[in-house]
Image (cartoon, rainbow, N blue to C red):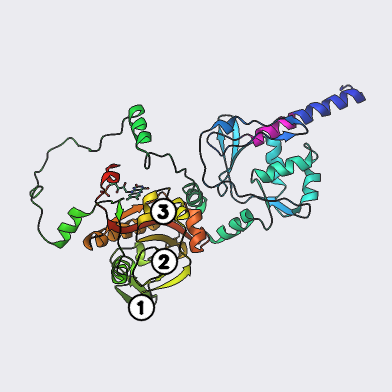
């Protein structure tokens, strides 16, 4: 028979429960592995939050999407949470914001209740059963476990509503947007040397055991423009001075991104044909030209119309520092004639292919265009460079696309070759 607890025992049990809950909230707020660092937070005058993750030396260029919680706000559980176990901790990751949080079972149960919009005051009252409801509500919102109606995160979740490629491809989409630039093996030779010393690179060749067949022609390449251009194509990072004739820009656009012709497919409609192949002939890639140094064309940001083969001005010139930031801190882009931002209109490819594997097609298509660009540019005598180390959010803001239906994929840069080859030495 259970002994009836006296009032001081009840008080101490409830205190213990609340302290346990406090630990859970701490756990909830602790950053896990390489997640964005969380600053120690003062709660009721005590520092109760685990700030160990603040030591993680990772620079995340895309900070969590801030949400402001007002008394009149409505909140509901995020639709973009993925759960997994890390050792004995259940981890919830918001695939859009990238935040990971360790969840106590009480928090999981509490989140279960928030599957419909709920006023913040009611939400706090509901959470009061676990801890200080107002505080817990703020933490759940900060960790993007709960989403505030009308916030950018809420809008992003709504925008992914027509995504057909499944949660894993969507998670990859957002995860692969998060990167740190600045000191990286791609822009700092010392970092690359350090990496090589600590972890030597894998072999650059593969040899299989088995009988071999000798092949002719290895040394003596055929003569001709194509072979010559293929031989000459190199990534060039040193741009010299000069003004690109408008006709050269027109040719570069036409032979890389332009329409060769249209074909009518019965019952389906028109398809485009370009110099590069495209999965399903869907041609999802668009291109925007940041014109810097081209005769007769004012510096500014333009969209290339494939339909009309002309440029539509959509914005003023991009400031030098902003352009460098958009291009992974590669400062040499400032000396270029034109920077081409490629984006993908997902719907074009998704319409035909409903499986997540088709996400690869967007990247493969952009890769083909990148190679065509460098071959055309090389053939015309220009210095060409491509980069995937871009700040997609910034590019998307500049060209005015949402990062979900149309998003940045690859960037091409063209300029006059420079005699200064030093910068070319990097790998
Ligand atoms: C998808 C892709 C992304 C690249 N990103 C960068 C980059 O961020 N920074 C850079 O300096 N070079 C970048 N490059 C250029 C490569 O470093 C270059 O192709 C490589 O060093 C080989 O030199 P090559 O192009 O002259 O053959 C990229 C190339 C490709 C294909």
Q: Is residue 328 left or right of residue 371?
A: right
Residues at discs 2 and 1 in contact (Cβ within 8 Å): no
* Stretch in magenta: 20-30
Please tell me which residue is depicted at 8% across the width and 44% down the height of the picture.
Answer: 214
Crowding at dot 1, Cα within 10 Å, few <14 / some 14-19 / many 20+, comes out as: few
- The circle on residue 69 is none
What secondary structure characterizes most of the magenta part? helix
Looking at the picture, how far across and down is residue 323, in whole percent? 44, 55
Quarter occupied by residue 109: top right
On the question of residue 281 being in view, the answer is yes
Please tell me which residue is depicted at 36% across the width and 78% down the height of the picture.
Answer: 266
Element at badge 1?
loop
Q: With respect to residue 170, does 16 lie above or below?
A: above
Whole-angstrom CA distance, mark 1 to mark 3, is: 27 Å
Looking at the picture, how far across and down is residue 389, in whole percent? 41, 48
Whole-angstrom CA distance, mark 2 to mark 1, is: 42 Å
- The circle on residue 357 is 3
Please tell me which residue is depicted at 71% across the width and 30% down the height of the picture.
Answer: 47
- Which residue in the protein does label 2 denote? 299
Q: With respect to residue 317, does 69 lie above or below?
A: above
Q: 262 or 83, which lies in front?
A: 262
- Which residue in the protein does label 1 denote? 266
Whole-angstrom CA distance, mark 2 to mark 3, is: 39 Å
Quarter occupied by residue 294: bottom left
């Amino acid at each position: 028979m259970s002994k009836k607890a006296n009032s001081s025992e009840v008080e101490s049990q409830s205190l213990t429960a609340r302290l346990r809950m406090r630990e859970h909230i701490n756990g909830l707020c602790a950053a896990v592995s390489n997640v964005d660092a969380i600053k120690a937070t003062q709660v009721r005058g005590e520092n109760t939050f685990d700030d160990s993750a603040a030591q993680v030396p990772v620079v995340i260029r895309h900070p969590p999407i801030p949400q402001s919680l007002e008394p009149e706000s409505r909140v509901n559980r995020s639709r973009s949470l993925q759960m997994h176990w890390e050792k004995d901790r259940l981890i919830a990751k918001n695939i859009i914001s990238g935040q990971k949080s360790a969840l106590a079972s009480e928090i999981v149960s509490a989140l279960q209740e928030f599957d419909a919009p709920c006023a913040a005051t009611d939400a706090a009252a509901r959470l009061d059963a676990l801890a200080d409801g107002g505080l817990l509500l703020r933490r759940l919102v900060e960790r993007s476990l709960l989403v505030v109606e009308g916030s950018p995160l809420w809008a992003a979740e709504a925008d992914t509503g027509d995504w057909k490629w499944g949660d894993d491809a969507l998670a990859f989409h957002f995860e692969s947007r998060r990167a740190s630039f600045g000191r990286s093996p791609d822009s700092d030779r010392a970092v690359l040397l350090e990496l090589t010393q600590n972890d030597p690179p894998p072999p650059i060749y593969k040899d299989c055991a088995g009988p071999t067949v000798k092949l002719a022609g290895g040394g003596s390449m055929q003569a001709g423009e194509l072979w010559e251009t293929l031989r000459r194509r190199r990534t060039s990072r040193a741009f010299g001075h000069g003004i690109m004739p408008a006709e050269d820009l027109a040719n570069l656009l036409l032979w890389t991104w332009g329409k060769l012709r249209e074909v009518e497919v019965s019952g389906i409609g028109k398809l485009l044909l370009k110099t590069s192949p495209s999965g399903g002939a869907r041609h999802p890639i668009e291109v925007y030209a940041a014109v810097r140094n081209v005769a007769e064309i004012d510096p500014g940001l333009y969209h290339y119309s494939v339909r009309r083969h002309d440029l539509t001005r959509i914005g003023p010139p991009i400031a030098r520092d902003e352009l460098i930031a958009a291009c992974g801190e590669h400062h040499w882009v400032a000396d270029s004639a034109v920077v081409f931002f490629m984006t993908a209109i997902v719907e074009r490819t998704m319409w035909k292919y409903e499986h997540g594997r088709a996400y690869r097609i967007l990247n493969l298509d952009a890769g083909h265009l990148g190679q065509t660009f460098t071959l055309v540019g090389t053939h015309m005598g220009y210095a060409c460079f491509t980069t995937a180390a871009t700040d997609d959010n910034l590019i998307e803001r500049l060209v005015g696309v949402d990062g979900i239906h149309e998003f940045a994929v690859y960037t091409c840069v063209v300029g006059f070759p420079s005699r200064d080859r030093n910068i070319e030495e990097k790998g």
